[in-house]
Image (cartoon, rainbow, N blue to C red):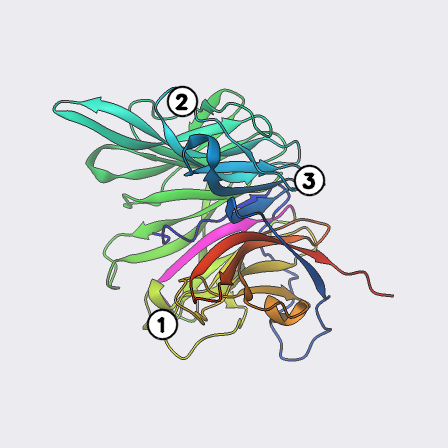
Amino acid sequence: MRLPFRIAVLAAGAVTMGVGMAAPSAAAAPAPQYRLVLGSAKTLEYRGINARGDIIGVGLDPARFGREEGFVIKAGTTTPLFLANPGTNNQNSVPRSINDQGVAVGNYLKNVVVPGGAVEITRPAIWPGPGSAGSDLGVNPTGSADAFGVNDQQQIVGWQGGGHTSITPWQRTGTTVTDLPPLGGSKDTEALGENSNGVVVGDAAVPGGTLPGGDQVALEWANGKLTTLGQLNGGAWSEALAINTAGQAVGSASPAGSSLLDSHAVMFSGGKAIDLNVPRGVNQGTAHATAINTAGVIVGDDAVFPDVSGISNGFVYRNGHATDLNSLIKPTPNVRVGGATGINDAGVIVGTAVLTAPDGMVSSVGYELLPIPTT
């Protein structure tokens, strides 16, 4: 399944790639330039942005002894408003998606008493607005679950843990939770994002796979019907992370002979994964297309890790061409624009920046890239 540090966080308007999307090409119109705005030292990463410019992320909450917690930054402001966890003695909230009304969903760690002590389980949560108290979504109430996407109709999707280590997908409309059909024979099927029309994307482990760690295929659910989105050049591993209102899906996939450790950023079209040809490093690494807006502009992370931070560079894909985001901003000493996790219909991009101090220490903060109008 997906790597734990590569979670897709989508604006509610995001869509999947479909027929009519231009194929990657070597020559294309240049991408716009951007103005870089760094988050405060409290922010560790930005995870998504909605149409009006509200940003979700994870940072260090001074009111909770510097513990990592989720936050919302309201459009036009710079102050992180940290999210309250549902219940008491629970911690580590992680917002994954925010819709255009400012409703956020994600997870938190719940303390559960068991014979001989206590354990923490992942629980899905909803926060109705910035700085508000969260509520448990009630999915799989006695076990683990997670929420990955919310649209403007407040349809929510995610996964839940079942017996025998199985993972199954679900969709919540109003107060009704519906189990989405899993891939036949698979014990691990996840819903990871959805668009405003309620079309859901995700992935599933493929029974009897041949890759080390297992095969995997990207999926789409439309009106309850499950469809496989395809693989990259005969490969055996793919995942769909985001879909826009036009039904265009993006994610990650590995070519034949490669595992998820050498995945490429892709779009899905015609039952196949199409390589976006983002920059790649000398050594194998993972690349992901994490978000797509209504205009079909895609962002994500490449497979280049230029320092010890473990955070690769961000890219933007438009007009059939992928461009390193660091080449589209004014050079800023000791700052590198890392993986992008969200883009809205105004073209504003968010993600995680890497900061290098004079003594060589590396840290991270959230970043926002504002398109510079052309004259």
Residue 174 falls inside the magenta stretch: no
Residue identifier under label 1: 256
Mark seen at residue 77: 3
Instruction: Give the extent of the magenta segment.
Output: 235-245
Q: Earlier in the sequence, mark 2 or mark 1?
A: 2
Residue 249 appears in view: no
What amino acid type should be assigned to the residue bearing mark 3? Thr
Residue for point 41% across, 80% down: 282
- As drawn, 34 above or below 135: below
Q: Residue farthest to the left?
A: 116
Judge by depth and name the residue closer to the eye, 54 or 229. 54
The amino acid type of the residue labelled 1 equals: Ala
Q: Is residue 178 above or below residue 96?
A: above
Residue at the (59%, 35%) spot, across then down: 151
Residue 111 has which mark? none
Disc 3 crowd rating (10 Å Cα; few below 14, some 14-19, many 20+) is: few
Residue at the image position 47 percent from the left and 53 percent from the top: 240
84 in relation to 319, above or below: above
Q: Position of residue 197 (x, y in %)?
A: 61, 38
Q: Looking at the rendering, which quadrant does residue 328 occupy?
A: bottom right
User: Is residue 289 visible in the rendered structure shown here?
Assistant: yes
Crowd band around label 2 with a 10 angstrom C-alpha radius: few (<14), some (14–19), many (20+): some
Would residue 240 be counted in the magenta stretch? yes
Q: Where is residue 260 in the image (x, y as percent from the top left)?
A: 35, 63
Q: What secondary structure is marked by label 1?
A: loop
Asked if the residue under mark 3 is in contact with the one under mark 2, i.e. CB atoms within 8 Å, the reply is no
To which residue does mark 2 refer? 138
Q: Earlier in the sequence, mark 2 or mark 3?
A: 3
- Mark 3 and mark 1 lie on one chain; the one further toward the N terminus is 3
Q: Real-space Cα distance between discs 3 and 1? A: 46 Å
